[in-house]
Image (cartoon, rainbow, N blue to C red):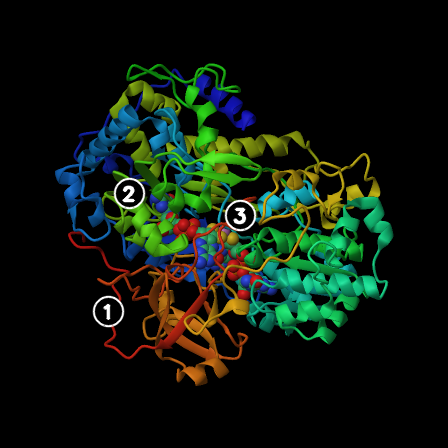
Amino acid sequence: MSVDRRKFLKIGAGLSALPLMPSFVGAKNPQATSIKPGLIKDGKVITAAHWGILNLSIKDGKVVKSEPYEKITKMDNPLQHYTADMIYKSRVKYPYVRKSYLENPDNPKRELRGKEEFVRVSYEDAIKLIARELKKTRDTKGASAIFGGSYGWKSSGNMQNSRILLHRFLNVTGGFVGVTGDYSTGASQVIMPYVVGSIEVYEQQTSWENILSDSKVVVIWGANPISTLRISWTATEQEGLAYFEKLKKSKIKVICIDPVRTETCKFLDAEWIAPRPNTDVALMLGMAYHLISVKKVNYEFLETYTTGFNEFKAYLDGKGDGVVKNVKWASEICGIKERKIKQLAELFYDNPTMLMSGWGMQRAHHGEQPHWMLVTLASMLGQIGTKGGGFGLSYHYSNGGVPTCKGGVIGGMTAGPVGIWKNGKFRGLPKDTSTQSGAEWLQNAATYSFPLARIADALLNPGKKIQHNGHEITYPDIDFIYWVGGNPLVHHQDTNTNVKAWRKPRTVVVNEIYWTPTAKMADIVMPATSSYERDDITMVGDYSNMFIAPMKQAVLPVGESRDDYEIFSDLCRVYGKNVYNAFTDNGKKAKDFIKEYYNSALAQTQAYGAEFATPMPSFEEFWAKNEPIKFAANIESLEWTRFKDFIEDPILEALGTESGLIEIYSKTIETYNYDDCKAHPAWFEPIEWLGNATKEAPFHLLTNHPADRLHSQMCHTSLRETYAVNGREPILINSKDARKLGIKNGDVVRVFNKRGEVLAGAVVNNDIMSGVVMLHEGGWYDPNEEGMCKYGSANVLTLDIPTSKLANGNIAHTGLVNIEKFEGELPKVTAFSAPKGAE
Ligand SMILES: Nc1nc2c(c(=O)[nH]1)N[C@H]1C(S)=C(S)[C@@H](COP(=O)(O)OP(=O)(O)OC[C@H]3O[C@@H](n4cnc5c(=O)[nH]c(N)nc54)[C@H](O)[C@@H]3O)O[C@H]1N2
Ligand SMILES: Nc1nc2c(c(=O)[nH]1)N[C@H]1C(S)=C(S)[C@@H](COP(=O)(O)OP(=O)(O)OC[C@H]3O[C@@H](n4cnc5c(=O)[nH]c(N)nc54)[C@H](O)[C@@H]3O)O[C@H]1N2
Ligand SMILES: [Mo]
């Protein structure tokens, strides 16, 4: 952060003499001035998306074909072929304002939000309206009433980073309320620092080269890498999939522990072990108990590298609660045979075993426990820090384990400092940006931010106090939401409650490319360009840093859509030239930033000296050539082993935990005295699971990440037609269960519980255990008059309660539902069309 700010200052000072861009607020067609004459009419353009580097074919100024730049696995990634639909379908083409809001923004009939028609307005009027209403909220309620947390997967690209641009805009104009954590790893990223001193979930993993040479067993525990590695946060280099292909060809035994026989399980021909959802902690406790009883525990490892095993053992033995966590006990909870539990535990002990865990099992009630228990089990096996053993929490994500390349890493957009405002006037940015002195809001901001997954609770209950990770949080009183680059009406749990929450603030503004359920829930919708309509640049390979890829504009913006950067720059302009200058760093255009980000990588590679293997060309050459730059891994990264330094020297290379050791017992967590997260990993019964299923809700619902989408992204493309069943989102049902319910493959079913109901299309087979159904997250919410989702958005059915007071993560994989054949007349799906009043 401080480095970025220093960079920001240096560059800002250097360019302060440049002339300003002409003001175009009020101009008729401002976009026309920024269209580059160099745009390709017929030919190829290289760009990148979360799903990889793409080679686009352009004909007559339109994208007609989209292929991977490089094919490095035999597996096809279907996400790579739908760029044309991503440009031309379901677009928000113009700025729109909800009718009642336009009529009376002070009393905008909030209850009609999401139902009422929209009115098209000019871009200039929309900008003025947002600027005016935002100022009104600031003046009357302060920065704590403005929510800019705005979480989501936006598009790749370090310049047009919509969320950071929003933060930058809200910062310069006086601050906003943000959030902590995310939906991905809400529980793990909070518990892991107590256990191993780092968040683990977003860290490089032991090199795949080591796994292939040294592991004898690989356990894929609640993960589906063949699906989830189709994308990365920056852009995928696809090497993780290539390594899974090598794993398939190797002699390594692979076991998948998952209620679903996943794409991964099938691809790898793995042994499938199906525990009841949310019972892995019990399963692992049973394994731990068994290992102790057959003396297959590495006590030397426990003594040297961990603390608290004795307290944990007392819990296993039932010292406090009178419940002995033996194999029989575990088997009754998780549903796996006692013999199998024992066999697995011994197999892991007897062989170099890498426990690769996904994040699904921590997106569950008491989701702090599974990974803590996994580390505890791995400690008992004593293989952490060896080449072929231990545990890893990111092999399924962004190609963890693919060796890091030696090269340059490009810079990116920064949120910038909080502007100083006095008596309604902008007084500039704080001089000392490292401490932010002078910008009072920043000190306050931290006290108002709350865990992301509590957003609906926060909107509905201003002033409510909650416990979080050892301290108390008071929810702010939010009256203005600005969201970009995310789809919260789809991604957040318990949609019906969420809809109520979104009807609470006075104003909701959304910049969107498409008419998503979130755009439809806004008062003011600004049309954003897709990444194919603007220039940008990205790294490719989140851990490997393998490529720097140009993301060249391929086609003209659709309708009146504008880059997020332009929208925020124009908003700043309304507040005055000096605000605009602060936001744009004195009038910089996208290309100026892109060049700067590139040059920071160039400087890094130049510092390696003349013998560096992959010298980078000048920015101008790179941009003109329109090709990615590829870096190579070196020997150290090919052999890199997570926790190796700590294992070699636990004193000098102590972990960042309180004791410097792996904490099986945390004295800090003990002091919190939480009833839902103890000082050691423990089994807690989830609020809803098969152990308390009822006739009203007999099935456990899993809401896995979709192979053929990135969350909700691409749901509107024709890729949907390849998996939708009768036009609905597919739901996976076990054959035996379906037979009992009289449901056949291809039937439309109603899935329901006390929180809501959705229609879905039945896929009946034996790839899921009996008693469990699976509906992917990310289907677009499409309510009818009664609030039933006609398409099949999973979160209508999920629970919006926190994992525990420790992490307050979401629990999307916990919840019970009922299911029946839908007999009524099939309603038309309208999720992918524009709302009333819009084109
Ligand atoms: N039930 C259930 N729910 C879940 C999960 C689950 O497992 N189960 N998983 C959770 C997880 S881990 C996550 S990360 C979230 C994901 O939730 P999101 O990240 O919100 O999901 P996306 O569909 O990727 O939404 C990104 C949105 O940004 C828009 N966008 C893309 N590029 C741009 C841009 O340049 N500018 C603007 N203005 N907009 C842009 C896209 O059109 C899209 O609507 O979902 C969470 N929800
Ligand atoms: N194609 C594609 N790839 C993606 C994404 C996407 O939307 N599409 N999203 C990306 C994002 S933002 C994230 S956070 C990651 C998510 O990565 P993960 O969180 O790992 O993905 P999930 O699909 O939620 O869960 C992984 C597996 O856990 C299983 N599971 C669920 N509950 C339990 C349980 O209690 N016990 C056991 N043993 N298994 C369980 C599920 O059946 C599923 O097979 O994926 C990323 N990759
Ligand atoms: Mo995520």
Q: Residues within 10 Å of mark 2 (few under 14, many from 20)?
A: some
Q: Position of residue 289 (x, y in %)?
A: 76, 63
Type of amino acid at the residue the image marks with label 1: Lys
Q: In the structure shown, which secondary structural element does the residue marked by tag 2 occupy?
A: loop
Dividing the picture into quarters, in which one does residue 710 lie?
bottom left
* Mark 3 or 2, closer to the camera: 2
Residue situated in front as seen by the camera: 147 or 270: 147
Q: Position of residue 313 (x, y in %)?
A: 77, 54
For the N terminus, the image quarter is top right
Type of amino acid at the residue the image marks with label 2: Lys
How far apart in space, not on screen, are marks 3 and 2 (Cα)? 25 Å
Q: Position of residue 670 (x, y in %)?
A: 66, 41
Q: Residue at x 68, y 33 (%)?
A: 610
* Mark 2 or 1, closer to the camera: 2
Q: In the structure shown, which secondary structural element does the residue marked by tag 1 occupy?
A: loop
Type of amino acid at the residue the image marks with label 3: Gly
Q: Tell me: residue 674, above or below residue 712.
A: above
Residue bearing the label numbered 3: 186
Q: Is residue 143 left or right of residue 354?
A: left
- Residue furthest out toward the left: 103
Chain-order first, disc 1 or disc 3: 3
Residue situated in front as seen by the camera: 284 or 526: 284
Residue 383 in view in this figure: no
* Mark 1 or 3, closer to the camera: 3
Residue bearing the label numbered 2: 504
Query: In the drawing, what numbered circle is on residue 828?
Result: 1
